[in-house]
Image (cartoon, grey):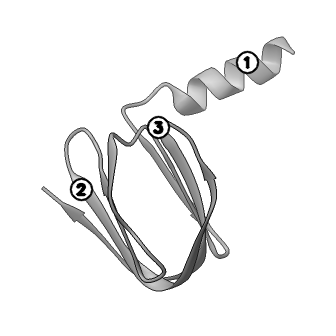
Amino acid sequence: MHLYKTVKSFLFDQDYFIDIWDQYLHVYEFIDVLTLNENEINLQLEKFKLLVKGDDFRVLKLTKNEILVSGKILEMRFIC
């Protein structure tokens, strides 16, 4: 169990964490959801906004500061 906590602490001890694989987008430590629909996700992070455009977005997990979305990602932008 100690190794699990160490690895988790290492991965999530950051201002934010964005991870993309297959047809999934995972964002940890966002501040607010500005837009969320089938074709666009706009998240406010501490120092920038994350704009993701695509198709068939579906929220699989949503907590106070973490989101997991499935769908086809076509474009991603960081907006200062």
In-front residue for pair 46/60: 60
Which quadrant of the structure image shows residue 36? bottom left
Which label sits in the foreground, 1 or 3? 3
Residue type at tag 2: Lys
Which label sits in the foreground, 1 or 2? 2
Do the CB atoms of the residues marked 1 and 3 lie less than 8 Å apart? no
The disc placed on residue 65 is 3
Question: Would you name the residue on which mark 2 appears?
Answer: 49
Label 1 and label 3: CA atoms lie apart by 19 Å
The residue drawn where x is 24% and y is 38% is 46
Q: Residues within 10 Å of mark 1 (few under 14, many from 20)?
A: few
Residue 39 coordinates in the image, percent (x, y): 43, 83
Which quadrant of the structure image shows residue 60? bottom right
Q: Residues within 10 Å of mark 2 (few under 14, many from 20)?
A: some
Residue type at tag 1: Lys
The residue drawn where x is 61% and y is 21% is 9
In-front residue for pair 5/27: 27
Q: Is residue 13 above or below residue 52?
A: above
Label 1 and label 2: CA atoms lie apart by 29 Å
> Which is nearer the N-term, disc 2 or disc 3?
2
Label 2 and label 3: CA atoms lie apart by 14 Å
The disc placed on residue 5 is 1
The residue drawn where x is 24% and y is 56% is 49
Q: Label 2's element? A: strand
Residue 6 coordinates in the image, percent (x, y): 69, 18
For the C terminus, the image quarter is: bottom left
